[in-house]
Every structure is written in structure tokens, then in C-alpha cells.
Image (tube, rainbow, N blue to C red):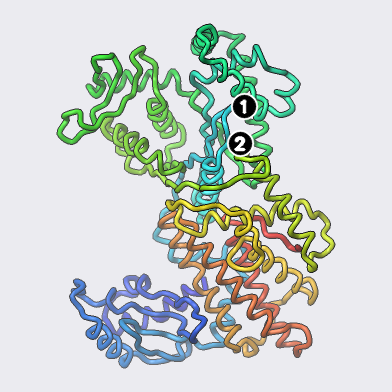
Amino acid sequence: MAACSFRRTIASQLSKVLDLPPENLIKSISAVPVSKKRHVADFQLSVASVIENSSGDCSAQDLHLQAQQLAERLKCDSVVSAISAGPGTVNFTINRELLAKTVLQQVWKDGSEYGVKSELFSPVPRQKAVIEFSSPNIAKKFHIGHLRSTIVGNFIANLKVALGHEVVRINYLGDWGMQFGLLGVGFQSFGNEEKLKSSPLQHLFEVYVQINKAAEDENTKKLAKDFFRKLEEHDEQVLSIWKQFRDLSIEEYTRIYKRLGVSFDEYSGESFYQEKAQEVLKMLEDKGLLQKTIKGTGIVDLSEKKDLSTVSTVMRSDGTSLYITRDLAAAIDRMNKHSWDTMIYVTDKSQSNHFQQLFQILKLMGYDWAERCQHVSFGLVQGMKTRRGEVIFLEDVLNEVRSRMLQNMASTKTTKELQDPVETAEKVGLAALIIQDFRGLLSSDYQFSWDRALQSRGDTGVFLQYTHARLHSLEQMHGNAELTDVNVACLQEPDAVSVLQHLLRYDEVLYRSSQDLQPKHIVSYLLALSHLAAVAHKTLPVKGSAPDVAQARLCLFHAARSVLANGMKLLGITPVTQM
């Protein structure tokens, strides 16, 4: 990574002056974010983080003074061309030609691995992560929360894979429970084999809605109970009906996920853990953790004082398991099967309490690995409606975003004759959805707006796609850039330097996202990159420039496009080459 070699050079000079090992200093040296208002240095050292006994009692004045004293003791060399003190920082400017040459060569050489090969990640051990995400309920709505879980889980999986970790992507379906008793009875009354095969998700949902209207009727209730009991007893005929519902639903889900660019290694579900949940209840009993209430339900005491002030219910009075019991069984089973280093559940924040209890019970059962389970929660999205009304199926959202995007593209004059306008509209529309979703902290709720998401100007996914397509056509028009003999002296304009400085920061941004699993760091970075590239595109023309200037600029734009594409793919966006 280009930034690594510069950080190391600066650290080695500092280490001689401060008498500290360079490894300790590298973390305190960071690339400076580009500012529109003023030209900035390339790197800065935070003085507070390297001063011995800095217990936070240094005043701002002290720090500034220490920064000045330190800056005076440092010398410029062939790499660092200027050193200055700022408020609590020492700022380093890299020799301009070296900056251009190193960054361009590194982006060129590393390609899709630019940034992830950085030594910032070398202390991070390669791990195996199990990620459970999406997880809709068969025959029920695929609501916007499932969509968020799908794109957030996919991002986390993409990021981990890019950083060299092994990832198992699991979709844990709601494929069991009393609703299948109702669904089975409903299908006998209202079902249609043809419709089930052609659009299973929609047909099962319609059947479920119809039978729910009749569910008040005592006879229907009894039939549903009987059906589910037979299912639990593995009655062959009933089981094959259930299996058909499940298999056809998964087939259709897989097709729709493919449109989203998402895939799973495993379609799991509650149905897998009926027997295993009973084993968990037996283990809880053997460990003396299972207590019975007067009504006969099974609970686990989670209170500190063991006074039952916080309990988790794990068993119904008839001895059957609950959702949390099946989750316990699933966690233990996955550990046995995958021996993972970390397991991440991606669901909305209303389930925080459920996961806290889940991890606590696992710990009480003596599973130390419960510490390595993590719930990545996200906020609620308000106001997402399609023209058909409320969102019921994921496919409705995808069709809506595609048709709105097609309309927008048809109404702009610049839209070229595309080979496949429908596919382009879908990719651009998805980028719009994902960027709108990832711009803030995952935990915050937000109000969804089609108009805002699909704007072509401003901080949107459409703008990222537009920038990528523009840079791509620039390369198509002027032949591909060659890095062999670029004259980097031609890249000294402020707008060129800003792009280079921004490219220098990419590994730090990836590192931040890898630490807190928030995509917003990458989103802000890519939006800023697109704005900087747009300015440079205006002020640094390729067409009509002297050959070596044109060549150098092409290289710069190629590097910007390459990093933009890498970041977009991590977020789950497929970059388009024309629009």
C-alpha cells in the first residue's frame, strides 16, 4: 500500500528523535482528509498519542508547543518535502512527484486488492466468520427490515472476504411453527399447484392471508393444530407438503437474491433444530439452569442476584421449544460444524434483547465462545412504499426501483443508446437503494424517499454510478492508460493532487469499517472521491492536451475509477460502464 511506505518512512525518522520503536508510531500517523477550502499536508502525527505519560492533562497550548518543538527537530529528506506544526499535530508533505508515482503504481499493481493489502491489517489474524442475515419467514411478508438485513449482511461478508477471512453466509428461514399448521390447512382449501409452482412466495402469502381470516373458527384451529402435530411427528404426507413449500420458496428466493447480487452458502431454518432444541432443554436441566414456573413453562434465570428479576422463557408448558431455544441449538450446532472464530447476526434493533439473552444463556451453559458472538443491529426504515402500496415482496422493491430508474434515464438527454437499458437501470437503482441505506449509522432510523435516492446530483448511488461510467468512457475514448512511462511531473495541479491524496487514505477508511462494521465510512469516502474526480474531469482535460500530460491524466482517472469500483463492489454495488 502506497500509504504504508510513507507512514513507515515518517515513523522511522520519528523513532530516532523520540526514541520509540517505529511500530508504535505507525498507528499515530494518518493520511489527512482532503479539504475543499485549503491545501493540506499528506500525513499528520497526533502528538498526544505518542507523548509518554500523556494522561489527558496536557492543555491544547502544551500540545501545540510540543508539536512545534518536535517539528523543529525533524528534517526534510527525499520523501518528505515539508514539515509543519498544527494544533497538536505535526504535518508532513510528501515530495509531489514521489506521491503521484507511488500512488499510481500501487493502485495499478494491486488492482482489486488495493487498500486491503495494507499493513494496517497485518496484525489482524485471518479468521472464519459465520454471518446469519436476511432470514425471511416463509408465507409472510419480506419486509423492508429483511431487505436491510440482506444488504448489510452482504456488505459485512464482502468486506471480510476481501480482507482474507473465510466466511459462511447463512440464511436462517422462518420455516417452522404453528403458521405451517394454518398454511397446510389453507392450502388444502385455497391452494393451487400451478400457482404454487409459478410464484410460490406470492401464492403462499395469499393462502396464508385467506386462512387467517378463517382462523377464528374453532374447526379451522383444530385442523391447523392437527396438521402441525403431524408435521412434528414427521408424518410422511404432511412432511412432503411442507417440504414442497420450503423448496419452492427457496428456489424463488435464490432467483431474487441473484438480482440483488447476494448468495448464501446455507439455507438453514428453525425446522432443522426441533430435536436439537429438545437436547438443549435437557442440557439446561442437567446443568441446573432450567426452572419451572407455576404454569409449567421453562425459564432460565438471568438476573445477577438470582432473584428471577430477569428471566428468559425457553419452553412452553407442553414441553415444546421456543424461538430462543432453537437459536441456542443453532449456535451450538454451527460451532460444532464450522468451528468459527466469530458469529455475526444481522437483524433490526428490536431484537437486541433477544440476542443479549441468547448470548447470556450460552455463557451460563459454559460456552466461552459466546463472547465471540455479535449482534449487528440496524434501525427502522419508514415510508418505503411501491406503486402497489406497502412492500410485501422483495421483488416489488426491485421492480419499482428498476422502473423508476428507467423512467429517469429515458427523460434525460444525455442517456446514450444502451445495449441493455433494463439491466443498467436495475444496477443503478440498486446502487441508489444501497447508498441511501448506508449513508448514516446503521443503528439510526431513517425516512425512505424514492426521489432523494434516485437523484442524479448530490450524494447518491446514482452519482457514484454516473461517475464510474463517465471515467470508464473517458478511458474507452482515449485508449487505455499505460503506466510504463508516465511523466508524473504533469500531475502537480491542485485538483490532481487532491485526488492522489484521497487515494492515499483508502486503506485507513477500510480499516475503520472493518473495526466497527459500519459501511458509512466507505460511502463517504466514495462520494468524496466522485466529487474530486468530477472536478478534476472538468479542470484537467485529456482531450487536446500534450501527449504526456494526457497520458498522466488518463492514469490518474484510471486509478480513481479502479478504487471507486473496488469500494462499490464491497458495498454490494455492481459498477456500470455506461448510462
The answer to whether 288 appears left or right of 383 in the picture is left
Instruction: Please give the residue where the numbered disc 2 appears in the rendered image.
Output: 392
SS for tag 2? loop
Residue sitting nearer the eye, 140 or 249? 140
Q: Which mark is residue 403?
A: none
Instruction: Please give the residue where the numbered disc 1 appears in the rendered image.
Output: 205
Residue 341 in view of the camera: no
Residue 392 in view of the camera: yes
Residue appearing at x 52%, y 81% in the figure: 36
Image position of 532 with respect to 273: above or below: below
What is the distance, in whole Å, between disc 2 and disc 1 at their CAs? 9 Å
Residue appearing at x 31%, y 93% in the figure: 72
Badge 2: residue crowd in 10 Å (few <14, some 14–19, many ≥20): some
**Quadrant position of the C terminus in the picture:** bottom right
Image position of 202 with respect to 108: above or below: above
Give residue 274's position: percent from left, percent from top. Answer: 45, 19
Image quadrant assignment for residue 457: bottom right
Image quadrant assignment for residue 577: bottom right
Image position of 317 with respect to 412: above or below: above
Q: Are marks 2 and 1 in contact (CB under 8 Å)?
A: yes
Residue sitting nearer the eye, 340 or 347? 347
